[in-house]
Image: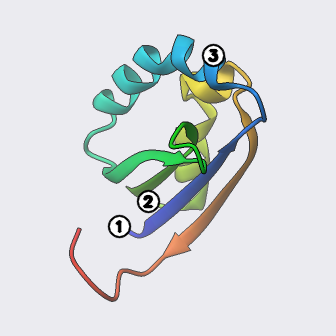
């Protein structure tokens, strides 16, 4: 299956919302372990979580978008923006 990068940027000042929703987000992603290749929070200049980056193995772009659509972070309104792009791993290993 193809790889996709989900680049998710938190809304400004939303760390409390992220923390309140984090356990549900992590549980959701654990249930999607077959799709998830790599993921974690992006950090701001102070080292605080300010977004997420995921690399997922999905059948197509629509499936990658659907993964994000049902994420508790998305449902809580955490994101300022989400970019979903096809990805080709060329260097390193996943």
Q: Residues within 10 Å of mark 2 (few under 14, many from 20)?
A: few
The residue nearer to you, when weighing 82 against 40, is: 40
How far apart marks 3 and 1 lie (CA) works out to 35 Å
How far apart marks 3 and 2 lie (CA) works out to 34 Å
Quadrant where the image shows the N terminus = bottom left
State the residue lying farthest toward the left.
93
What x and y, as percent, mark residue 70? 57, 28
Callout 3 touching callout 2 (CB < 8 Å)? no
Q: State the mark number for residue 59.
A: 2
Whether residue 8 sits left or right of residue 80 in the image: it is left
Instruction: Provide the residue designation for mark 3.
Output: 16
Residue beneath the point at 36% across and 80% down? 89
* Lower sequence index among marks 1 and 2: 1
Q: Quick check: 20 above or below 43? A: above
Residue beneath the point at 23% across and 68% down? 94
Callout 1 touching callout 2 (CB < 8 Å)? yes
What x and y, as percent, mark residue 73? 59, 26
Instruction: Provide the residue designation for mark 1.
Output: 1
């Amino acid at each position: 299956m193809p790889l996709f990068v989900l680049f998710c940027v938190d809304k400004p000042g939303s760390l409390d919302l992220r923390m309140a929703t984090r356990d549900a987000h992590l549980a959701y992603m654990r249930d999607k372990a077959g799709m998830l290749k790599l993921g974690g929070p992006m950090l701001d200049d102070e080292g605080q979580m300010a977004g997420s980056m995921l690399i997922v193995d999905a059948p197509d772009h629509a499936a990658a978008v659907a993964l994000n659509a049902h994420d508790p972070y998305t449902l809580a309104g955490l994101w300022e923006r989400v970019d979903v792009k096809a990805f080709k791993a060329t260097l390193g290993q996943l």
